[in-house]
Image (cartoon, rainbow, N blue to C red):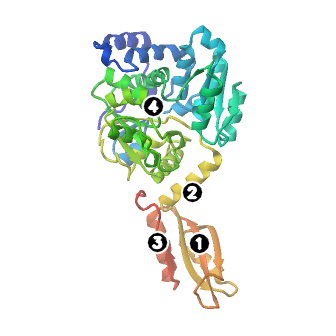
């Protein structure tokens, strides 16, 4: 394996590095083929936002490296003040406004991270910010945006209706799109420069993709400075809009169903982002809902990092049963953890699903005597095998058992899949007929 470099241990002189960056920059020769965002825009944003955006750590993960077979570094952008990378683009966009635009204020439509980033940096920079949020926006995020001083308007059943309202009712304010705005893309690209500073020997970057703003800016920066570095995108299979755009040759609607990675559930990628990303991104890959749930669980358990579904998508791709598992053996792989704003109730459900996928939470049925002590005997057997009962209930009416028997459904906690099999086998050895429930997640669980 390549030598590991801890991003936090590097103390490179910033001015000297910036000179090196600019020396590598080559301006486009053909203006007709000039993309909507160029490397010069990223460099300008990189300098501009340093006054108010945290330079987040990029740390080596021992456990994830062992699980995936490559050297994994986590770029922890969920440690920004508002919990996501969106602050990079938001601050750059606000600092790029003319004096007249600042006085008039800006408007955005968002149900989450972009809204928080705009509200926080708008207050910090003295720019009035209005955010139109759909009625189904999480109450906690609506409340936090108001705390930051933003003018919050609740309108529409989804983000599309909120966006239409913003354009129609506030034409005097500049609209800032959360992923399809040149300044947003350039600001996001600052993460790419930081990664190259913190992990100079990086081989691969695996980046979550929603509207494609982050991967567009990041790939532009990285490929300009280090063309040999591979940049791979990861999307939820339920909304793989970037892959659909690549196949069609232009942005198309690719929404299939809701996803745990709600921050990546953008039905149509931005045309500006797509135009930049398609020039620099090597490939894109899809992950399932359970891939994402397991990734959130792994990050929580092993890295003590709380990530939302979209923020954990990159990790989901490299873990066992992920599309990139064992693809980069021995290589240095950087994965942005781009968001950590997950509701507590959602996190609880995700943990349960992750445990089920690991066979650390199993469900089965068994028939026991409907006499006093019948269930007590069963629970003792499970305990003797080392299982911990989380839930148990019995069914008398909707069952084909004898009248003196009852069907019992158990949900128990185990150590791993091997232990789960041992528990069920032990119960069967005691004379019980076990109705094993096929795991919904066998296609993704290791």
State yes or no: discs 2 and 4 in contact (Cβ < 8 Å): no
Residue 388 pos. (x, y %): 59, 66
Q: Is residue 199 in sight in this rendering?
A: no
Q: Is residue 233 above or below residue 193?
A: below
Q: Earlier in the sequence, mark 4 or mark 1?
A: 4
Is disc 3 surrounded by few (<14), some (14 to 19) or many (20+) residues within 10 Å?
A: some
Q: Earlier in the sequence, mark 3 or mark 2?
A: 2
Q: Earlier in the sequence, mark 1 or mark 2?
A: 2
| Foreground label between 2 and 4 | 4
Q: Which residue is mark 2?
A: 352
Residue 289 pos. (x, y %): 48, 52
262 vs 245, left or right, is right
Quadrant that contains the C terminus: bottom left
Residue 404 pos. (x, y %): 64, 91
Q: Is residue 184 above or below residue 232?
A: above
Q: Which residue is mark 3?
A: 422
99 vs 427, left or right, is right
Is disc 1 surrounded by few (<14), some (14 to 19) or many (20+) residues within 10 Å?
A: some
**Alpha carbon distance from label 1 to label 2:** 15 Å
Near-viewer residue (393 or 13): 393
Disc assigned to residue 410: 1
Near-viewer residue (71 or 75): 75
| Foreground label between 3 and 2 | 2
**Alpha carbon distance from label 3 to label 1:** 15 Å
Q: Which residue is mark 4?
A: 270
Q: Is residue 188 in sight in this rendering?
A: yes
**Alpha carbon distance from label 4 to label 3:** 51 Å
């Amino acid at each position: 394996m390549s030598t590991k470099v801890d991003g936090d241990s590097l103390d490179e002189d910033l001015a000297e590095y910036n000179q090196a960056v600019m020396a590598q920059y080559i301006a486009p020769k053909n203006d007709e083929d000039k993309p909507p965002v160029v490397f010069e825009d990223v460099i300008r944003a990189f300098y501009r936002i340093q006054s108010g955006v945290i330079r987040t750590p990029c740390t080596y993960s021992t456990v994830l490296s062992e699980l995936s077979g490559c050297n994994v570094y986590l770029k922890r952008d969920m440690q920004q003040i508002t919990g996501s990378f969106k602050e990079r683009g938001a601050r750059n966009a606000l600092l790029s406004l003319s004096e007249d635009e600042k006085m008039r204020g800006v408007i955005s439509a968002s149900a989450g991270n972009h809204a928080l980033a705009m509200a926080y940096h708008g207050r910090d920079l003295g720019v009035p910010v209005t955010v139109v949020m759909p009625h189904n926006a999480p109450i906690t995020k609506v409340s936090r945006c108001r705390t930051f001083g933003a003018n919050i308007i609740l309108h529409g059943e989804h983000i599309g209706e909120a966006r239409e309202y913003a354009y129609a009712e506030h034409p005097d304010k500049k609209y800032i799109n959360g992923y399809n705005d040149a300044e947003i893309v350039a600001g996001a690209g600052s993460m790419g420069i930081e990664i190259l500073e913190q992990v100079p020997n990086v081989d691969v970057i695996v980046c979550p993709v929603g509207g494609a703003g982050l991967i567009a800016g990041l790939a532009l920066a990285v490929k300009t400075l280090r063309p040999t570095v591979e940049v791979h995108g990861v999307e939820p299979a339920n909304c793989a809009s970037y892959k659909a755009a690549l196949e069609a040759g232009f942005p198309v609607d690719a929404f299939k169903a809701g996803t745990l990675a709600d921050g990546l559930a953008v039905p149509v990628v931005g045309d500006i982002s797509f135009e930049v990303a398609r020039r620099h991104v090597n490939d894109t890959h899809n992950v399932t809902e359970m891939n994402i749930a397991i990734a959130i669980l792994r990050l929580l358990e092993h890295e003590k990092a709380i990530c939302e579904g979209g923020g954990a998508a990159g990790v989901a791709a490299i873990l066992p049963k992920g599309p990139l598992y064992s693809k980069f053996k021995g290589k240095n792989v950087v994965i942005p953890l781009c968001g950590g704003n997950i509701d507590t109730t959602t996190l609880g459900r995700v943990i349960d699903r992750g445990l089920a996928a690991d066979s650390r939470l199993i469900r089965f049925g068994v028939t026991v005597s409907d006499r006093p002590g019948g269930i007590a005997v069963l629970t003792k057997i499970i305990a003797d095998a080392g299982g911990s009962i989380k839930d148990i209930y019995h069914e008398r009416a909707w069952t084909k058992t004898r009248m003196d028997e009852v069907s019992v459904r158990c949900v128990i906690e185990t150590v791993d899949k091997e232990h789960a099999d041992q528990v069920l086998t032990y119960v069967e050895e005691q004379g019980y007929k076990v109705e094993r429930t096929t795991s919904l997640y066998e296609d993704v669980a290791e």
